[in-house]
Image (cartoon, rainbow, N blue to C red):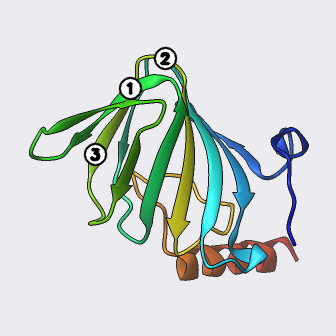
Amino acid sequence: MIVRRLKDILGTSRDVKAQNWASRRLLLQEDGMGFSMHHTVIYAGTQTHIRYQHHLEGVYCIDGIGSVELIPSGVTFRIEAGTLYALNKHDEHWLRAETDLHLICTFNPPLTGNEMHDENGAYAAAAEITRVEADQTMQES
């Protein structure tokens, strides 16, 4: 059984931060669950371009107000506490936060923990992450 508390993740390698967000990675690929789970905070007043080409994501909002705008259609959905949205077609979108958005996010396949958005708003496929990590390890040796 795995038991983790958010307070124990803060400030560790599982607490990943970018300009627009912080992702507290509760479950990762190494945990062997077949998915990963994250408590993500999208900072108020930001917009983030996202397109997970290699992952499916389900998102449940537990606090805050924002919106998701699908690209290229422009269809926009309001996000608030109690809202679930699932990017079941690798949907390209803008995620906007009016207030800090607290989201519980699940990814399939699971994230390894080192992912950051690339120039297309995507995370690399797990195999690509593993290869990059291996290359970095070899360079450090």
* Amino acid at pointer 1: Gly
Q: Is residue 104 above or below residue 21?
A: below
The three-letter code of the residue at mark 3 reads His
For residue 141, which quarter of the picture? Answer: bottom right
Tell me the CA gap for discs 3 and 1.
Answer: 13 Å
First of labels 2, 1 by sequence position:
1
| Image marks 2 and 1: residues in contact by CB distance under 8 Å | yes
Label 2: element kind? loop
Q: How many marks?
A: 3
* Nearer the observer, 47 or 79: 79
User: Residue 140's x, y, as percent?
Assistant: 84, 71
Q: Residues within 10 Å of mark 1 (few under 14, many from 20)?
A: many
- Mark 1 highlights which residue? 66
Q: Nearer the observer, disc 3 or disc 1? A: 1
Q: Secondary structure at mark 1?
A: strand
Instruction: Give the image quarter of residue 69.
Output: top left
Residue 86 figure quarter: bottom left
Q: In the rendered view, tell whether residue 30 sits above or below residue 74.
A: below
Q: Tell me the mark number nearer the camera, choosing from 3 and 2.
A: 2
Q: Tell me the residue that label 3 is attached to.
A: 93
Q: Is residue 38 left or right of residue 42?
A: right
Identity of the residue furthest to the left in this view? 73
Q: Is residue 53 left or right of residue 18?
A: left
Q: Position of residue 67 (x, y in %)?
A: 32, 30
Q: Earlier in the sequence, mark 3 or mark 1?
A: 1
Task: Name the residue type under label 2.
Answer: Thr
Question: In 3D space, how far apart are the residues under numbered discs 3 and 2 (Cα atoms)?
Answer: 18 Å
What residue is pinned by disc 2?
A: 99
